Amino acid sequence: MFNKKKKTAAILLISAVVLGGGGYAAYQLNAAPTSQSAKKSSSSSKQWLFPSEKKDSTKKKAKEKEKESSSSNKTEKEIQAALAPDLPSGSNDNQAASAFPFSKDDLSKQLASSNTQNLVSLADQGTAEQNTPKPADNTPTAPEPTPTPVVEMPTPTPTPTPDSQTPGNQTPGNQTPGDQTPGNQTPGDQTPGNPTPVDQAPVISFADVLYLHLGQKSYDLLDGVSAHDAEDGDLTHKVVYASTVDINTEGTYQVTYQVTDSAGHTVSATRDVVVTNDAPVIHIASDNRVEVGHDFDPKQGVTADDYQDGDLTSAIKVTGTVDTSKPGDYELTYEVTDKNGAVTSVKRTVSVFATAPTLDVSKVPTTLKVGDKFEPMANVNATSPYGAVNVTVYGSVDTSKPGSNDLTYTVTDKFGQKTVKQVTVNVEADKPTLDLSKVPTKIKVGDQFDPKANVTATSPYGAVTVDVDGSVDTSKPGSYELTYTVTDKFGQSTTQTLTITVSETV
């Protein structure tokens, strides 16, 4: 299409010889409508004189159009060179379209000029190029230069689009205030405000150290290992590892874990695996107490085992002794060694005890009369399963007077074990007696009266004293109350009251 335009432009210019100024005007009218970037101004007669080709939406077509546009610009400049020198300086569009001030001689000279001959050559060249297939052009094209119109006029400002902007078009004159704003950027634009997300590498997590038993039959080196990726989520099932663990040799080994996410990011992490020989364990299930005189086997109820060796009871060694002939605490040490040299030692305290002796004081009298005989060891019963015992009593009982007496009995067996009991013995005395039955209670006025006459007072412990409180006035009739008190040597007393009546007649 572009070559066809060249030929048409040349023919139109040559026809100017016959048509005069209309030839150039016809060229203008024919070329202007093909421009896709020219914009009509407020005056309908103002147009782009040298329009550029519209670029296709695809990149391939755009490159072809850029090349053709460059060639078209070159052709248009040559056309200008043929005509423009004869136009008055500063001519406007209307003058360029209608004024063609050449005489017939001038036109003949114009046809014979080198400029016109160049146009004829361009027409022939366009015809040849149209019939010749174009080879593929892989040479990068330069940005399309801005055309320079012959007639100066206000330059229209086309609105740039993402497809039509090239580095050569990015000039301040071609940009509008609405251009180059964040609102006109597409999601794919690489701007600081919209950075492309960076795919994150996965992360492997696990406990610091994995402990295994020496000779362990079953174990999982992935135990406690997990992997997570920000984009892929859980990647635990994709974790692989490399290990040099020798489960039959005690020591510290390293296991390296590795995982790769869907973006190809591979991470590794290493942790220690410790293979240890387990020390034997000693179990003591029997009682730690044994009675005096009973047999005692230090290994009875004692067992030992080991993760690697199993039952090691027969390998137990005991140091120390237990003397069951007497009470006491005895320390034993149990020790066992497994096949790998691990040693376990346990201490045990065995208590040998004896049954305390018995003491029976239930038959010891706790109440006595003054003057009674008392034997503190009589009726005391003390025994021991281990033989003879020794009974002692602390305290005494004085049966010569009333009172409370505390006794402490202690029985001791041959091992020095003691049993202690206390007994309280009360010594009591009979109170004195008082007989007032023979004391007259009625007397005549003027008779003699002795209040102690005919009073009988006694005590089994000896002499007593009798006191009378009150008096009787026999000089006049009346009733009189007397109080008699008899007291023995222990201070015990007996009291009675008697009423005496004095009257004129008996």
Image: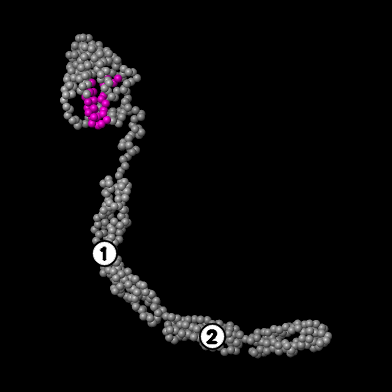
- Disc 2 is placed on an element classified as loop
Q: Is residue 391 above or below residue 33?
A: below
Magenta span has 69? Answer: yes
Q: Residue lying furthest top in this view?
A: 104
Determine the residue positioned at 20% across, 13% down. Answer: 110
Position of the C terminus by quadrant = bottom right
Three-letter amino acid code at the position of disc 1: Gly
Residue 364 sits above or below residue 7 on the image: below
Residue 468 lies in what quarter of the image?
Answer: bottom right
**x and y, in percent, of residue 484 in the image:** 72, 84
Residue 194 occupies quadrant? top left
Query: For the stretch drawn in magenta, what is the main secondary structure?
Result: helix
Q: Which residue is mark 2?
A: 364
Q: How is the image coloured?
A: one colour
Indicate which disc, 1 or 2, sits on the residue closer to the N terminus: 1
Quadrant of the snapshot with the N terminus:
top left
Q: Which mark is residue 254?
A: none
Q: Is residue 394 left or right of residue 188?
A: right
Magenta extent: 47-76
x and y percent of residue 467 in the render? 71, 85
Q: Position of residue 290 (x, y in %)?
A: 39, 78
Say if residue 51 shows up in the picture. Answer: no
Quarter occupied by residue 101 = top left
User: Which residue in the protein does label 1 denote?
Assistant: 215
Q: Nearer the viewer, residue 97 or 401?
A: 97
Callout 2: few (<14), some (14-19), or many (20+) C-alpha neighbours within 10 Å? some
> What residue occupies the far right of the structure in this picture?
504
Between 310 and 424, the one nearer to me in the picture: 310
CA separation in Å, label 1 and label 2: 75 Å
Q: Is residue 68 above or below residue 273?
A: above
Q: Amino acid at mark 2?
A: Val
